Amino acid sequence: MPVSTNIIDQTGALISSQEMPKTYWDQRIQALSRLRNISLPSKKDEYWKYTDPQVFNNPSVLLTNVVITDENPMFGIIDCLKLVFVDGIFDKTSSDSLDDEPVELVWLSSGTKDKSFWASNFYGSLEAEAQNRVARPLAAFNSAFAQEGLLLRVFGKVVKPIHIEYINKSPTADVILHHCVKVEQEASVTLIESGAAAARFNKVMEVDLSVGSSFDHVNVQGTDIEGVVSSQLFAKLSSECSLKSFALTINGTLTRHESIIDLVGDNSSAYLAGAAIGGGLFHHDDTVFITHDALACESRQVFKKVLRRGGKGIFQGKILVKPKAQKTDGYQISQALLLDEESQFLVKPELEIYADDVACSHGSTSGAIDEEALFYLRSRGVPDEKARELLVLAFLAEVFDEIDNAEIAEELVNHLQLYLSGYL
Amino acid sequence: MLKISNLKVKLEDEDKVILKGLNLAVGHGQVHAIMGPNGSGKSTLSYVLSGKSGYEVTGGTAELSGENMLDLDPEDRAAQGLFLAFQYPVEIPGVGNMTFLRTAVNSQRKARGEQEMSAADFLKLVRAKAKELKIDAEMLKRPVNVGFSGGEKKRNEILQMAVLEPNLCILDETDSGLDVDAMKLVAKGVNALRDESRSFLVITHYQRLLDYIKPDVVHIMADGRIIKSGGPELALEVEENGYAELLAEVS
């Protein structure tokens, strides 16, 4: 479909409003040319039908209501290696050192002259590859203009979770971060991201998993009033790997959360899960594209949303099974609990299968609070509001089961409980 | 304890009158049984008393310890001491049995202005009651009624009753779907709770349950009214002759 001149103009306007950082210049120039080719997203695009991308396309952003919530710091009680970003800028004094860990961490903004440095070849590469299947213009834009990001190489087992904490202070903070993670053979790491990063946040994370490695990822957003987020995870798994990515979103306005996963080595597994709850201007979009291109891999998508007061939930999940991906096991479920009639859940599950020895299933439901269950609880003396809270938690419980680390899962459930009780 | 006067109830969404001027008084410490043919309004009575939506009260009152409760929310009725043992206990995936029961106990206490029960005291109480009812501790860890057999569900109802210590217990066809052994166990649980300050309204189709939970008064309900009341012998009469004779007597 020809791109409308309007979108081409917008793409030009956005590009000229940005200043391209000097590091990783060649990679950025290539990303910029990809962006010019595909142009910014528009509502006419297949995967942007349900989410209006305009707020990401505008040259600048302004919020009127930035809420700083540090009363209930997430993961305060879990022993983490903390890396803090304030309005997209790394805050060294508030952060922990990773010097004693089996990792190598450098910053995108530091640049490199070494062409053989792993990130020189890796930066933007998974994003570029993914463009061949479905255009991801916001990711190409990110690769071209990212201001900062961590380039993390993991050599061994990192015991404590690495916790990236985002803090937003300015109502005009327009933050573009691009993280690259390379987990070497048999290595493992847990990476947590939390907090409202900016008024507008465009984040890309590219993850390369070597043989036998594992990557646990937990992403918590929310409780800010207005921030808009585009978050894209690109991951490539070689054989015998495990990827787990979980996202909890509480409130906020527009969140577009994309996961683009390529299973290219045999016997690997990719588990994606998400819980989202919000109302009013809340618009939460999970868009997933999993490609099975190797033998006997497993992929799993479990996404649940609780929507109220006109909140909108989107789920677009695709599983592509290529001809050689025999013995693929693919599972996908998306469910919404609609707390009132104004709320909406729009779903587009897709299976595209070219191998014949494959087990793939998908399902989707949306429903209201179970009145029978509600009455049962109330008949035992549980007040209406509390009973509804229990049922909302119950609905989401299955998603939290997807998290291996019990301590992290508990912290997230506690956080959600505080929100439901009106404390956040 | 419970005084129902001229209670008239119709379905909210359709013009169907179910209770047509029902009168009933249950004294302190008494056990009253209500029997009656299908469609006579027995279950509706239990739902209306406990505050389920979908019914419209068009006349009459129902007082618990002197207070009309028909305007109260279900949770407030519970806090006042009303308990309904469901005919079909509801499965609630994702809500742990213990979390549920503890929330219920403490919500009721809070509503009554009493101090909440500590986790340790609560655990002790539930374990003791569960043991009496032969409820496996593993069962308590599961989500509310999920994966419970019919008998386990009914025992779980009685456990909740034992822990919540209500003043008025309504048992809605608690015997349905139970084998004899399960019924005996449930009846034993109920009997253990009988005392002079607690009253029971036992709704049943069959006399059999009343062999194990001995009623003080038996009422026969038909077409939205109590048509006859008497002693335990009335239940035996029904068992023997069915309802036809009684219904003919009245009309």
Image (cartoon, coloured by chain):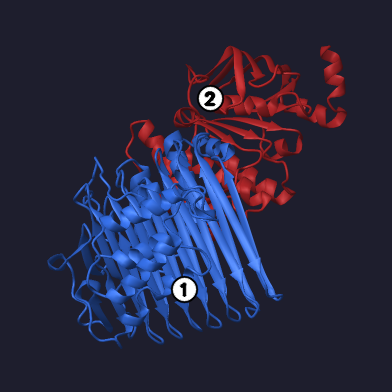
The residue at the point 34 percent across, 62 percent down is A203
Q: Nearer the viewer, mark 1 or mark 2?
A: 1
| Numbered tag placed on residue B125 in the rendering | none
- Residue A77 in the figure: left or right of residue B82: left
Which chain does the numbered disc 2 sit on? B
Q: Which element type, helix, strand or loop, lies under badge 2?
A: loop
Establish if A158 lies above or below A313.
below
Image x and y of residue A96, in percent: 18, 71
Q: Are marks 1 and 2 on the same chain?
A: no
Establish if A126 lies above or below B16.
below
Establish if A82 lies above or below B14.
below
Image x and y of residue A190, in percent: 35, 72
Residue at which label 1 appears: A129
Residue at which label 2 appears: B28
Q: Nearer the viewer, residue A178 or A338?
A: A178
Type of the residue with mark 2: His
Quadrant (top left/top right/bottom left/bottom right) for the C terminus of chain B: top right
Q: Which element type, helix, strand or loop, lies under badge 1?
A: helix
Image x and y of residue B149, in percent: 66, 53
In the figure, the shade used to draw chain A is: blue
Q: Inspect this view and state whether residue A281 appears.
A: yes
Q: Nearer the viewer, residue B37 or B55?
A: B55
Q: Inspect this view and state whether residue A395 appears.
A: no
Mark 2 surroundings within 10 Å by alpha-carbon count, few (fewer than 14), some (14 through 19), many (20 or more): some
Q: Are marks 1 and 2 in contact (CB under 8 Å)?
A: no
Q: How many marks?
A: 2
Q: Nearer the viewer, residue A38 or A194?
A: A38
